[in-house]
Amino acid sequence: METTESLASSASSASTSGTTDALQLFANYPFATDSVYQQEEKAEILRRTQVFYFNRMTGYSVTVDEVRSLERPSCDGSSASSNVHVAAVNQPEASDASGEAHTLSFAELKTLIEQGKTDQIPNNRVIPNELSSETPSESIVPRGRNRGRSTARSSRCRQFQRRSVRVLL
């Protein structure tokens, strides 16, 4: 089994060989025995469950990225806890930095509705409580004898209609 150092040196040569070599190295990497990976994986799972539980119990909407930035030591040595903001209370984001639509959590939606800021909810539009003043569109239903029915059925219907007309006369 290869060591982490030999895989790292192989990875630098893989960039010249192409993506296929890198994928092969990834497939053969010993994630199950790499103690650093195992520790980071456990920490990430624990962080996600803590964020989920905190949001559920408090109604806030703290993100995992915000918690990561809180846990990371800041450059000036001061605590990053004063910089953390809760998206549900301060500013819910309609989109992230890459321009993709941000899906709001239930707590964020609840807070926006309670504050009357429904205009900040993505894909939320006001539906008027009145009928449209536009002219109605033309029907596109086929106007033929059968109208999509089988010929046998439509002929039985015509026979029944003729009989009922005779009885009424």
Image (tube, rainbow, N blue to C red):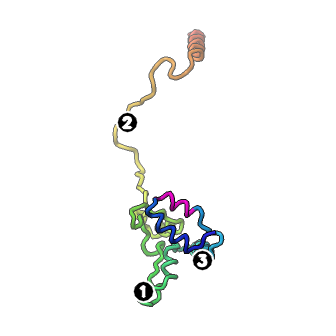
Asked if residue 164 can be seen in this view, the reply is no
**How far apart in space, not on screen, are marks 2 and 1 (Cα)?**
64 Å
The amino acid marked with disc number 3 is Val
Judged from this view, the residue extending furthest toward the right is 33
- Report the residue marked by disc 3: 36
Dot 3 and dot 1 residues touching (CB under 8 Å): no
User: Going 52% across and 71% down the picture, which residue do you hit?
Assistant: 8
Where 78 falls versus 126 (above or below)? below
Number of the front mark, 3 or 1:
3
Between the residue at mark 2 and the residue at mark 3, the CA separation in whole angstroms equals: 67 Å
Depicted 169 relative to depicted 30: above or below: above
Q: Do the residues labelled 2 and 3 touch (CB within 8 Å)?
A: no
Which of pointers 2 and 3 lies earlier in the amino acid sequence? 3
Q: Return the mark for residue 75.
A: 1
Quarter holding residue 101: bottom left
Which portion, as a residue range, is magenta? 18-26
Q: Main secondary structure of the magenta part?
A: helix
Q: Residue 136 carries which label?
A: 2
